[in-house]
Amino acid sequence: MKVCIVGAGAIGGFIGARLAAKGDCHVAALARGATLKALREHGWRLLQDGTLIRGPALATQHAGELGVQDLVIIAVKGPSLAAVAQQIGPLLGPNTAVLPAMNGVPWWFAQGLPVLRGETLRSVDPGGHIAKAIPYSHVVGCVVHAGTSISEPGLVKHKTGRRLVIGEPDKAATESDTTESIRVTRVAELLSGAGFDVTVSSNIRSNIWYKLWGNLTMNPLSAITGATTDRMLDDPLVLEFCSAAMKEAAEIGASLGCEIVETPNERHEVTRKLGAFRTSMLQDVDAHHMIELDSIVGAVYELGCRLGLPTPNIAILLGLTRLFGRVHGLYPEASTTNGDAA
């Protein structure tokens, strides 16, 4: 099997290194800058449990040099996806599976949902350009439950977790709700063989929504305040605000067939077990990278608007974080979320 990792950062490098080290497939990378240079010099590198895992890497910044792949794993940050989508066409053949290992609500989420008339989400794919470049038929949904970081370009450090949840976005792609598609089975076997704890889901949107439900408030609030998750959970007023926003998101999810069975307090206890955790958005602020606000908060706000559901707390969260991002140069000055060009 030919596999290409698009975005060999913390998550992409984690997956790429384990696949390359296993040796059951040819693992290429679409990368640039210092990461590209490091991959060409050292190959894939992953520091896990005190051991350096290595594997050969065919790395380039031009998709045309790699040709059609069997599996393309996209692991870039949300703000970079639109540009990346326009570059990966040469990687996609009629049977290529595309596995987005990314945070938040993906660009394809509304496609295939009758309640949303299959329209793309303007917050994460304005103009529908990503959906045109990466057709819905190629997508295999994915949720990553792992903590990784970059020690230096091309060197990934694994912290915790190796769970991947994957599944067909469209149940019509399977013979029944409990039957896995052939391509999902192949991808699951490949990832499992590389040491990942893989779960195949019959409703991957629900898995995406559940992870988002936990990140919806902790990520942006940590970005604004600079606080770790334990400090936010210890503040009763902040905790009350988080719970109110999560209740709004749970109602949206229920309307989309992504019902949340936990209460916000139960989810807070799960988060509390992480201790003094620095969210991905806080890490982006510290590194002065663009924040993934649209896929984590903007998309939820847009979905609420399109479904006619009130989201006053999510709106406040979006507005405050958006303003913070603009003041600090971490979010575009001109952006459209559900037609709101403020």
Image (spheres, helix red, strand yellow):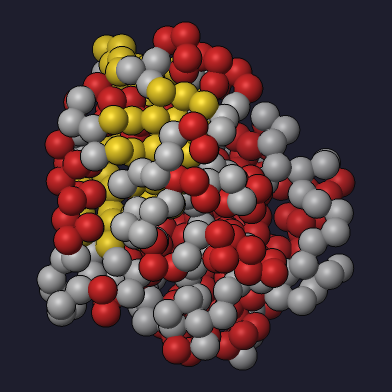
Q: Give the answer, above or below, for where 134 lies relative to 341.
A: above
> Can residue 236 be seen in this snapshot?
no
The percent coordinates of residue 48 (x first, y second) are: 30, 20
Q: Give the answer, above or below, for where 220 lies relative to 63.
A: below
Q: Residue at x 86, y 46 (%)?
A: 327
Given the current orientation, which residue lies at the most extreme top position?
41
Q: Residue at x 57, y 65 (%)?
A: 132
The percent coordinates of residue 290 (x first, y second) are: 70, 42
Q: Give the answer, above or below, for where 54 lies relative to 23.
A: above
The percent coordinates of residue 118 (x first, y second) are: 50, 82
Viewer-side residue, 239 vs 65: 65
> Can residue 337 be seen in this snapshot?
yes
Viewer-side residue, 28 vs 167: 28
Q: Is residue 205 left or right of residue 227?
A: left
Q: Quadrant of the N terminus?
A: top left
Q: Residue at x 15, y 46 (%)?
A: 189
Question: Image quarter for residue 57?
Answer: top left
The percent coordinates of residue 154 (x first, y second) are: 48, 19
Viewer-side residue, 28 vs 80: 28
Q: Quadrant of the C terminus?
A: bottom right
